[in-house]
Image (cartoon, rainbow, N blue to C red):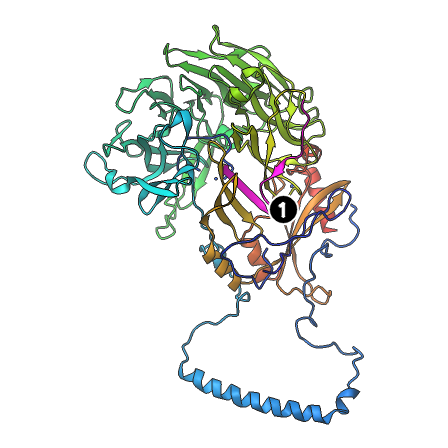
Amino acid sequence: MPSSPYQRLPDAGGQNLAAMSSAHINTQTAFTRPETYYGEGPFDPPSSDDEEDSETGSLLEKRNAPSSPGLAELGDGFPSGSGRDDSDLKKRPTSLRFFAILLAVLLLFSATVGIIAARNYQEVESYRPGTRKLTIDHMFNGTFSQERTSVNWVPEGIRNTVAGDGVFSVFEGGDLKLVDLKTNTTKILVSSKDIKDDNGNPLYWFKWELSPDMKYILLKTGYRKQWRWSTFGNYYIHNIEAKTTHPIIPPTNPSLTAYATWAPVGESIAYVTENDLYVLPTPSAQAIRITTSGNASLFHGVPDWVYEEEIFSGDSALWWSPDGARLAYLVFDETAVDEYSFPIYNPTGDSNAVIPYTTDIVMKYPKPGYNNPIVSVHVWDRASGTTTELEWDGRFKQEDSIVLEVAWVGDEALVVKEVNRNADGGNVVLFDVGTAPIARGTVVRKLGKNGEEGDSGWIESEQRIRRLPKNLTVGGQDAYLDIVPTPEGYNHIALFSPASSGKPHFLTSGKWEVTSRIQGIDVQKGLVYFEAANPSSIERHVYSTPLPKDLSFKPVDPTPLTDVTKPAFFSSSFSPGAGFYVLNHQGPTIPWQKIVQVDNATFEHFLTKNERLANITMEYEAPTVVHSTIVSDGYELNVQELRPPRMDDTGRVKYPVLFRVYGGPQSQLVDLKFSRNWHDYLACGLSYIVVIVDGRGTGYKGRSLRNPVKDNLGFYETIDQVNAAK
């Protein structure tokens, strides 16, 4: 396979870290043109959800990249005045006679072939591989769509005595199947034909979740979209052995239940309908109503729009304790939040049934300087049936308080992370819910300029706390991992042991960043698995690092699980015991997925190879992609160019240049992911040069690059784009 056109970005000293070679795809043939997804975090029960003035030289100057071919290289001959001497040709008539005879033979052969071909001619569109033209339709009609398989790991050990590590469920061919990687066996767990409503009609579900004991499946039907992450549905419980199905509440049209999930042990379900929270102790029991005040402005256990969109990037705000004995949840009161209305065009969502009138949507939308929802934290105790609202000293005023994270770090230990609205100050609060009174917590960590960040930048909105099993902690106390900035400003994994400690003990360090949640913990080996933007910020690789046996340790270099000598973009999803993981290759070459066994280099279970996409990609033109860096006001910025195929870089041909600009805080557009999108069409179809610059404020290069834009959005971002254009 030809080597990839990508090269690793130079480091701070300007040295090339490594030459790029293409990632290998087992079934993919060699591309004739330059080639240009599972961060699951803490384990959840298996379900169907498992988803950055002074630059010398031109921006378009080649930087450690292969040259685009010039006209002469493309066979257009020598330009006039090239100085070529033809006198030698006149001295060799024998050679000319030979070539004349050869030409006559070739013409005769071609004529014969032409006659034969004419008799078998069919009128078809003919393209040479790699030269078919991209059109705008190709970008939107699924031509370059990627195949992806969702793997849902089955809990092991105490949560499931039937399955061991390396067992996952997958929906295939109308059946829910259980795959055991250790024994290489597959069995049908549930057939869709067995799932029917009370009238015997088949149920069509869009989401499902297997119970921890694998006796039941929770199904979500009656899909109704709300915001980016949230939907409504009718939930059913299916008994696998008895092959019976019943709703958790009577189904409605439109559907009203926003969220439901199993407890981590046992057979209890927590669900939210009409903004009130309920617990179903067992599938056959009567539901317990936890809250009674839910309405259009008061949410229990599910977020309102702004928390869904800006804080959690998800549709739930409830958390079972590890032993299933307690349930923590948030309450959001948006009564004082002002309303905002906007039109929805063609509300059918169906291009074949266009409605020429809009539908107006009215929502509670907090704008800067106006009211936010009021949030409070509550814990329901199963044994006593009581609910307690949590408080702590030093809490911000209600109108200035934002809860960023709630996490159980033990059966009775709960952590709440709070920041002010400006996100420049905050607290991490620990609650011992096993000791009365539980309502008052203790501040164990300080965040912001006078805390862990130590600068004037934002406290980042992430949910990355991961509880450690007690057999892996020092002294058997409650402890946890979190991802926090080092004094140098790079996000790394830190141990907080015991949970009441405010001192981070860093497991990783360096001028690179951990980008994901903790992907897995191997209890037997004492290893932590994670993803990082390392060796360069536009890459993602999977690593492991050991947990310390005491607190006197120093960080060690992590061990890569992927080949870091080949620049690439990976993501992963680890099994509960961390003995297996799904490895998602997302670029720069054709994406693929496979399951890897940590201790067995020969084990390989491919999920998707995207052979269709590989074949299609070989047929069509692709832009030449060039990665580089520039310096803007002393900041090193990542740059990506999409150049037209066969671009004439001699300067004789002028090309329009389009800057693709975003630059949202902690975002990244310049990376090594494979994609075919609108900008590829502009480069190939319209011969544009598309330039992408991750300026100040963007992610994965440390807080020193992210912080300047705080309180001054749009200023430095513009300067960086202009400097790049120069």
Mark 1 residue type? Val
The prevailing secondary structure element of the residues shown in magenta is loop
Q: Quadrant of residue 480?
A: top right
Residue 57 or residue 83, whichever sits in front: 83
* Residue that extends furthest to the left in the rendered view of this protein: 199
Q: Which residue corresponds to mark 1?
A: 670
Circle 1 crowding by C-alpha within 10 Å: few under 14, some 14–19, many from 20: many
Q: Residue at x 58, y 43 (%)?
A: 562
Q: Quadrant of residue 326?
A: top left
Q: Residue at x 67, y 93 (%)?
A: 97
- The spot of residue 612 in percent (x, y) is 45, 57
Instruction: Decide if residue 665 is in sight here.
Output: no
- The spot of residue 122 in percent (x, y) is 40, 77
Q: Is residue 391 magenta?
A: no
Residue 141 or residue 90, whichever sits in front: 90
**Helix, strand, or loop for circle 1?**
loop
**Is 297 on the left or on the right of 311, as rendered?**
left
Q: Which residues are magenta?
A: 553-573
Above or below, comparing residue 660 to residue 322 in the picture = below
Above or below, comparing residue 315 to residue 567 in the picture = above
Instruction: Decide if residue 71 is in sight here.
Output: yes
Quadrant containing the N terminus is: bottom right
Residue 425 or residue 9, whichever sits in front: 9
